[in-house]
Image (spheres, coloured by chain):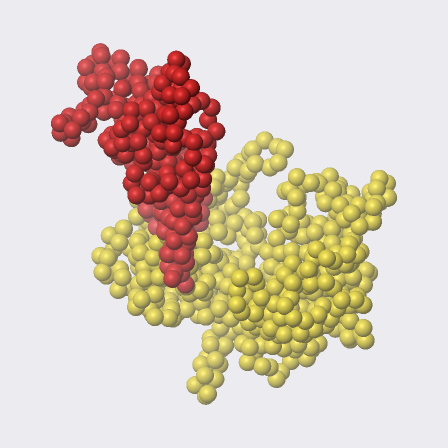
Amino acid sequence: MGPALRLVVQRIALGLLLLFLVSILIFWGTLILPGDVAQAILGQSATPEALANLRDELGVNDPPLTRYFEWLGGVLTGDLGTALTNGKDIAESIGSRLENTLFLAFWAAVIAVPLAILLGLLAVRYRDRWPDKLISGVTLSTISIPEFLIGYVLMYFVGVKLGWAPTVSMIHDGMNLGQKLHSIALPVAVLTLVVLAHMMRMTRAAILNVMQSPYIETADLKGLTKFNIIWKHAFPNSISPVVNVVMLNLAYLVVGVVVVEVVFTYPGMGQYLVDHVSKRDLPVVQACGLIFAAVYITLNMIADVVSILSNPKLRHPK
Amino acid sequence: MSDPFVKVRDLRIGATVYPPGEKPHDIEIVHGVSFDLEKGRVLGLIGESGAGKSTIGLATMAYGRGGVRITGGEVWVNGRDIMQSSLGDLRRLRGGEVTYVSQSAAASFNPAKRIMEQVTEAAIKQGKFSRHEAEQRAVYLFKKLGLPDPEHIGRRFPHQVSGGQLQRCMTALALCPEPDLVVFDEPTTALDVTTQIEVLMAIKEAIAATGVAALYITHDLAVVAQVSDDIMVLKTGDMVEYGTTDQIINNPQEEYTQALVSVRSIDHEEKQPSPSPALKIENVTARYRGTNFDVLKNVNVELHPGQTLALVGESGSGKSTLARVITGLLPQRVGRIHFAGRDLDPVMKNRSKEDLRELQLIYQMADTAMNPRQTVGTIIGRPLEFYFGLKGKEKQKRIQDLLDQIELGEGFQDRYPAELSGGQKQRVCIARALAAKPKMIICDEVTSALDPLVADGILKLLLDLQKIEDVAFLFITHDLATVKAIADSVAVMYRGEVVRYGTKSDVLSPPFDDYTDLLLSSVPEMKLGWLEEVIAHRKMESAGN
């Protein structure tokens, strides 16, 4: 087994172990949350007998270890349990919402990642000249403004004044891809503006770091154009740090969109999670938490694997 | 008569410097240098660091490193003044008409790309060849340069070939676009002597076969004497002497050139071993953690008080590893280290303060061995406090004594390392080692990063100090001239073993074992035609076997 393959297998095994530990943490964390779901369902006027009956029915009284393994077994077989508050199957409820969230995140990523890297390359090409300063200035401003504010500003100007895109981003199965994309144009724009700066600056810094290397001078003395040098000789050697930041931002696009989803009343995971946290619906919170953790861990695992594979010394041992 | 192919007139090069504590200002680093170069000829540029050799070489490509720029003069290549060329024309010049071979091929190859892609890139980019033609030419050059498996070596990544092979690939990279001029910038300096000789021969043959003009930049006069037709001697940006190789080597006119040409001026008489050695290494075998082969195999050497043992060998031979074992950084698996009448614990943590004090180290890179934010006084004063508890006036007096010993004056106490020259930095490191009053100092390639004349000064200083302080030196080096200058006894190392060991006169006189013979005969000699002689001799021998 080559060193690259061994490292990749190691990373994946570590990722799975981490996911397991996180599942324990999530389960334990929701256990110690204050409050009582039975009380929340039945309200203040419930009799003690009714509360006790409901608790029995919901299985809240079983020992934690039993409940953890029952829960974990369910999760592994695709059964996330039923929501305590409305008795609906969680997997079913989350399914379409997760799909919507991923749909939004995917299109934001498709636009933001190449754009950020291109801007990073341009910033290096015109280092310390006006294009570099303009790119840095604009991206830093958009990351500094809270996303809900950007959301409302875009809504007002692009949505209301110009009427180019809807201000409420409802999507459903009956729409074709074009209609869906039109519907999510504004939230995608907001998300892009929010994640752009981080990735762009990391690309710029990573490439500038490599630009000091003697092999860049070699490329320069071959008479290559500056952009060619950056793209062909510098960028391949700065993939590792860039991929790590890209993955962190992708993770943010999935798990951090709560605010944007609420602003544009988009039917994604964020809204669903917020609703059920306020109702102390533990199975739902646990399921959402686990999904978010899995997204984070998977994306970071991919970043690690790409970093390993981008190292020619590991990919092609002596 | 037509104009020469390369014509440089009154070349002036400037740079902006940022000295600590001063305002940045512009200085001139090359002051009006002129030369001509015809196709098929090689001009050697020689001088110490800071002489402006590389800067002049890069100027023929209208290129300046960092803030370096050409401020005046003319550089004519192929009938046009490149100072007047547009950026587009310069791009066609660079990598097309003029190419560059750098000192460290390992750093100058992009680690993420295959060798073939990098070798052919300029030729394809400049429109000289199609991809197929360029690859054919690369394979031809790989063959010409004596690389193993020339058909397939291009498919490898830079880290998959050895340093000497990569340096030859770099030469192929420079020759692939059929340039008119190649700038060789110290192409063999980073190589071991036995590798250097092969690369040198390959470069020389390739230059002859392709008929290019070449600038050969080096600090080693013996090397440049083998490859160039003419030599220009430079010192701090000024031309000192310019003539044919024969004239410069055999009949130098200027004092500075004479100093460069004259062999080491150190006169050192070999001392006889004493009955009780200061350091005795018995059957030491060691390996690095997580590996399964021994990097040191059954090493036995002795070092006598007040004497110098030179450890010689190529990179990877285990000489620095032996130093790590002696200092306890890498505990040996087998064997004993007997030092100053006692056995040293293999692990440094278990050693006493006295053990640490009596065994000091001086490193190759004086730069990185000192804290840049401490003054010279603080650096030298630290061991005085740590080992002897000296304070105040007493400490000041001792620091001053030490500074006098290393021939640096009063004013140096308050200076920072950045304000010192390379030689001065190494002297401060010597003073720091001496401050502990050690019985033995391990000197790890202490003169390798220094110019020859400066290195000479350091070696003389070390010998003088040895007489006064009666300290023993374990001198690690790959440079046989240094060994001849200072050693009392010599151990030749090869692949973790001591292959030859004894007094200097014994080790350096025949009959030799095969490896020592190879090593000794590979050291360039300052005479014309030496390279051809050695190669011819070796071919004859291998034919005879």
Residue B544, position in %: x, y? 45, 88
**Chain letter of the red region:** A
Q: Is residue B518 above or below residue A128?
A: below
Q: Residue at x 65, y 70 (%)?
A: B334
Image quadrant in which you'd find residue B485: bottom right
Left or right, residue A202 beside residue A177: right
**Seen from this angle, which residue lies furthest right?**
B394
Looking at the rendering, in which quadrant would you find the N terminus of chain B? bottom left
**Seen from this angle, which residue lies furthest bottom?**
B544
Q: Is residue B329 above or below residue B263?
A: above
Residue B351, position in %: x, y? 74, 58
Q: Residue at x 71, y 70 (%)?
A: B336
Image quadrant in which you'd find residue A20: top left
Q: Is residue A66 above or below residue B249?
A: above
| Res B7 visible | no
Residue B421, position in %: x, y? 64, 47
- Nearest the viewer among A311 and B30 is A311
Instruction: Report the number of discs.
Output: 0
Q: Residue at x 38, y 65 (%)?
A: B207
| Res B228 visible | yes
- Nearest the viewer among A64 and B427 is A64
Image quadrant in which you'd find residue B278: bottom right
Residue B70, position in %: x, y? 45, 42
Left or right, residue B181 beside residue B130: right
Q: Residue at x 27, y 61 (%)?
A: B135
**Chain letter of the yellow region:** B
